[in-house]
Image (cartoon, grey):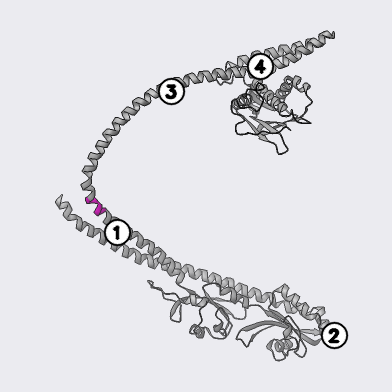
């Protein structure tokens, strides 16, 4: 024990030294690898941006180069120069400028005087010595000129002479808007410049660079701008040599060729993004190694405390465990007694609930045939009084069918406690609907209800118990009749469709359903006391579920309620086997 404690300080020192050595090696290798990788990524992105910028400049120049040719052939311009009437010429040039996106348009007569311009302040000014006028009068094609303005900015123009009857009558000048690219480039961290074939800067994000060479521009003191952000980069922790220095700061230079008169475009990207990304990874690594050191110190410090508390904890845990076992034994005994009493109570309650549900079901299901029998007996009595025994015999036959149905209902109630398919058979839903409507004939005749049936021409076959399916349909028809009692023009729509499932919709134009959530709950009813038990929809839902389908209800947007019975369609192979 003592020897182990003497080795602990040396072991701790060895672990700390190993962690520090691993941290130094890892940070050095990570810095070199990530710096090279992120530098290459940044350079590739800068070159991609330069290619995009070069394409934009060339596209703008090409778009403006065709304008002088078109305007030199414009009849309105030629007519104005011949007649000397330039009242509409400036407005026409303004409309052309808005369409093509040029910086400015200028119309000069044969003497070089501005007769029309998008900038009306230039009308009347003399441009006889301007390069775009002199070169245009000497050439037969469109000429490109770069003019140095007083502000130091460059003016990029395309000009072409206008001929009439082989005589010079004027010159049309189109100024390309390349200054907008300077504004767009100034919104990024890179410094961007464009040089002509002589190496003179003609476009730059830094205004003081224009008119200088690149070497002179790199030593020019600039005001804080987008360039200032590009200058604040260093190559700390890196052996990568910078491409250039601006005001003593290292930057990454990228060059690309502009396919126009020997122009070139260059960008100077700061190492800030590279350094920030590398430093972010290095900070995570340093944090990881710091956590390892912390964990090592913490573990060594906690080991001594753990040993001293182990025996006390074990004795306390044993006492608590003994007390807990005694309490659990007592609780188990009480729980077993309570469970035995609860099982007896549940068994008795289940018997009473089953007996009440069966009696209520018998009462509910037999009320409909009894009501129909009463109606048929009254009709038969009236027919016998009128000496029409043949028709009375038909009523007696229907009464006999109802008695058979009542017997089937009572026999079926005996099997409610089990689920079986011995009474299932293939049947046509259309026939079940017709049979249910026949059962409801007395109730339908007692009221004026418009019933519409939309049935497919082909049989809609399902696997179900015929008697129980008719029981569901009769209950839905009866609820629809009851729902339309207070309606002026009662109507019930029966719609049967067949797809992946057989869907039968029973829709009425009553007042709808107030409580859809509890609609299928047992003993829930909206009828007056004595008119219903509240078990019809609950029983019907259970029957449809036994058939493998579902019974749903919703309120129609047009008013009333819609009950829908969905049953699986009987497969053709199953029907053939049946």
On the image, numbered disc 3 is attached to which residue?
Answer: 342
218 sits left or right of 24 in the view: right
Give the mark, 2 or 1, whose residue is nearer the N terminus: 2
Magenta-drawn stretch contains 324: no
Magenta span dominant secondary structure = helix
Q: Is residue 141 visible?
A: no
State yes or no: discs 3 and 1 in contact (Cβ < 8 Å): no
Neighbour tally class for label 1: few under 14, some 14-19, many 20 plus, Cα within 10 Å = some
Pair 2/4: label in front = 4
* x 61%, y 27%: residue: 524
Magenta residues (range)? 299-304
Residue under pointer 2: 83
Q: Which residue in the rendered view is the most extreme toward the front?
A: 529
Percent coordinates x, y for residue 204 in the rendering: 56, 79
Which residue carries the number 1 mark?
A: 293
Q: Are marks 3 and 2 in contact (CB under 8 Å)?
A: no
Taking 29 as reference, is 492 above or below it? Answer: above
Q: Are marks 2 and 4 in contact (CB under 8 Å)?
A: no
Say which element carries label 1.
helix
Separation of disc 3 and disc 4 at Cα? 36 Å
Judge left or right: residue 1 versus residue 516.
left
Disc 3 crowd, CA 10 A, few/some/many (<14, 14-19, 20+): few
Nearer to us of marks 2 and 1 is 1
Indicate the quadrant where residue 468 lies.
top right
Please tell me how crowded label 2 is: few (under 14), some (14-19), or many (20+) other residues with Cα within 10 Å. few
**Residue at the left extreme of this rendering:** 2
Q: Which mark is residue 366?
A: 4
Badge 3 marks a residue whose secondary structure is helix
Q: Please state the horizontal and vertical placement of residue 529, each as a whole percent of the image.
A: 65, 23
| Nearer-N-terminus badge (2/4) | 2
Q: Is residue 561 visible from the viewing direction of this image?
A: yes
* Nearer the camera: disc 1 or disc 4: 4
């Amino acid at each position: 024990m003592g020897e182990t404690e003497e080795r602990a300080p040396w072991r701790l020192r060895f672990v700390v030294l190993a962690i520090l050595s691993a941290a130094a090696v890892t940070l050095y290798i990570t810095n070199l690898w990530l710096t090279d990788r992120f530098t290459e990524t940044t350079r590739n992105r800068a070159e991609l941006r330069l290619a995009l910028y070069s394409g934009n400049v060339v596209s703008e120049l090409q778009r403006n180069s065709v304008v002088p040719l078109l305007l030199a052939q414009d009849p309105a311009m030629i007519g104005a120069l011949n007649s000397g009437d330039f009242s509409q010429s400036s407005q026409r040039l303004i409309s052309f400028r808005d369409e093509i996106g040029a910086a400015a348009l200028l119309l000069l007569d044969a003497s070089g005087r501005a007769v029309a311009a998008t900038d009306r302040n230039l009308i009347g000014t003399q441009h006889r010595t301007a390069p775009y006028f002199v070169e245009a009068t000497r050439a037969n094609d469109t000429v490109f000129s770069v003019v140095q303005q007083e502000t130091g900015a460059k003016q990029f123009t395309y000009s072409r002479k206008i001929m009439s009857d082989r005589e010079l009558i004027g010159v049309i000048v189109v100024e390309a808007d390349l200054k907008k690219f300077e504004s767009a480039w100034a919104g990024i961290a890179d410094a961007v410049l464009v040089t002509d074939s002589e190496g003179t800067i003609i476009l730059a994000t830094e205004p003081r660079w224009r008119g200088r060479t690149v070497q002179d521009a790199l030593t020019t003191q600039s005001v804080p701008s987008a360039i200032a952000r590009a200058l604040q980069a260093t190559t700390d922790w890196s052996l990568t040599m910078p491409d250039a220095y601006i005001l003593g700061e290292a930057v990454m230079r990228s060059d690309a060729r502009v396919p126009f008169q020997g122009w070139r475009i260059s960008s100077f990207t700061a190492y800030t993004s590279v350094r920030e990304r590398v430093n972010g990874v290095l900070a995570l690594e340093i944090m990881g190694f710091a956590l390892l050191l912390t964990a090592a110190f913490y573990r060594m410090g906690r080991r001594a405390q753990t040993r001293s508390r182990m025996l006390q904890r074990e004795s306390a845990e044993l006492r608590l465990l003994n007390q807990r076992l005694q309490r659990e034994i007592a609780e188990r005994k009480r729980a077993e007694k309570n469970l035995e009493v609860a099982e007896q109570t549940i068994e008795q309650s289940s018997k009473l609930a089953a007996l009440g549900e069966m009696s209520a079901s018998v009462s509910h299901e037999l009320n409909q045939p009894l009501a129909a029998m009463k109606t048929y007996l009254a009709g038969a009595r009236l027919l016998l009084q009128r000496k029409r025994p043949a028709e009375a015999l038909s009523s007696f036959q229907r009464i006999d069918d109802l008695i058979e149905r009542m017997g089937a209902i009572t026999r079926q109630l005996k099997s409610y406690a089990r689920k079986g398919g011995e009474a299932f058979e293939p049947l046509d839903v259309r026939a079940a609907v017709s049979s249910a409507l026949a059962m409801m004939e007395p109730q339908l005749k007692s009221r004026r209800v418009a019933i519409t049936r939309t049935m497919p021409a082909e049989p809609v076959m399902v696997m179900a118990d015929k008697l129980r399916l008719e029981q569901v349909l009769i209950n839905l028809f009866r609820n629809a009749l009851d729902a339309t009692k207070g309606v002026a023009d009662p109507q019930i729509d029966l719609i049967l469709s067949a797809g992946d499932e057989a869907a039968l919709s029973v829709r009425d134009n009553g007042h709808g359903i107030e409580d859809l959530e509890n609609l299928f709950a047992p003993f829930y009813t909206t009828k007056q006391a004595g008119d219903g038990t509240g078990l019809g929809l609950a029983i019907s839902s259970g029957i449809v579920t036994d058939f493998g389908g579902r019974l749903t209800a919703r309120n129609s947007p047009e008013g009333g309620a819609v009950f829908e019975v969905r049953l699986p369609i009987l497969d053709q192979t199953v029907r053939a086997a049946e």
